[in-house]
């Protein structure tokens, strides 16, 4: 589902004295569509703890066909990647073990509306 990929179901006419109600129905439709889009998003901040090379992240909502973007917020000291993305979470990996302070990272995930 995409916000740019739909048509409003109601068409107000300039000569309709009740056009304001038609516009309100379109606003209600748009609000429902936005709710559908935003309930299929999850995000957060996690950390790969000192000495570890990966961290499992679990979503707070089910996200069918999830797409995940993650970014370390401190220098990981090498390559990093994500794997194992599914409807319930993913794993963030580091090439080398996290230093004493760990490696924090932020992420966002979006799933389908199914």
Image (tube, rainbow, N blue to C red):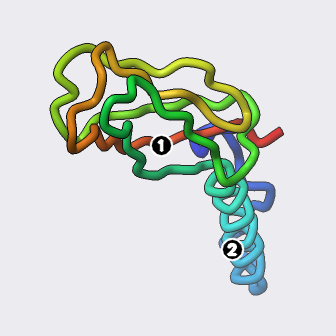
Gap between marks 2 and 1 measured at Cα: 33 Å
What residue is rendered at 71% in x and 78% in y? 24
Q: Disc 2 or disc 1, which is closer to the eye?
A: 1
Residue 18 place in picture, x, y as percent: 78, 84
- Asked whether 13 or 97 is in front, the reply is 97
What residue is rendered at 79% in x and 61% in y? 10
Q: Earlier in the sequence, mark 2 or mark 1?
A: 2
**Circle 2: element type:** helix
Q: Is residue 61 above or below residue 107?
A: below
Quadrant in the picture for the N terminus: top right
Dividing the picture into quarters, in which one does residue 34 lie? bottom right
What residue is rendered at 64% in x and 36% in y? 89
Q: Where residue 57 is drawn, which disc sits there?
A: none
Quadrant in the picture for the C terminus: top right
- Asked whether 23 or 48 is in front, the reply is 48
Q: Residues within 10 Å of mark 1 (few under 14, many from 20)?
A: some
- Asked whether 112 or 52 is in front, the reply is 52
Circle 1 sits on which residue? 108
Dividing the picture into quarters, in which one does residue 60 lie? bottom right
What residue is rendered at 28% in x and 38% in y? 103
Residue 94 place in picture, x, y as percent: 34, 20
- Left or right: 71 as drawn, with respect to 46: left
Residue 101 place in picture, x, y as percent: 21, 44
- Left or right: 25 as drawn, with respect to 105: right
Circle 2 sits on which residue? 23
């Amino acid at each position: 589902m995409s916000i740019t990929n739909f048509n409003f179901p109601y068409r107000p006419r300039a000569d309709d004295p009740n056009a304001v109600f038609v516009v309100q129905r379109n606003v209600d439709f748009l609000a429902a569509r936005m709710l559908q889009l935003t309930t299929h998003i999850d995000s957060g901040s996690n950390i790969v703890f000192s000495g570890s090379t990966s961290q499992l992240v679990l979503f707070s909502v089910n996200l069918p066909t999830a797409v995940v973007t993650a970014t370390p917020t401190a220098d990981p000291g090498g390559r990093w990647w994500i794997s194992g993305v599914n409807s319930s979470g993913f794993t963030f990996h580091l090439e080398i073990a996290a230093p004493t302070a760990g490696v924090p990272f932020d992420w966002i995930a979006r799933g389908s509306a199914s």
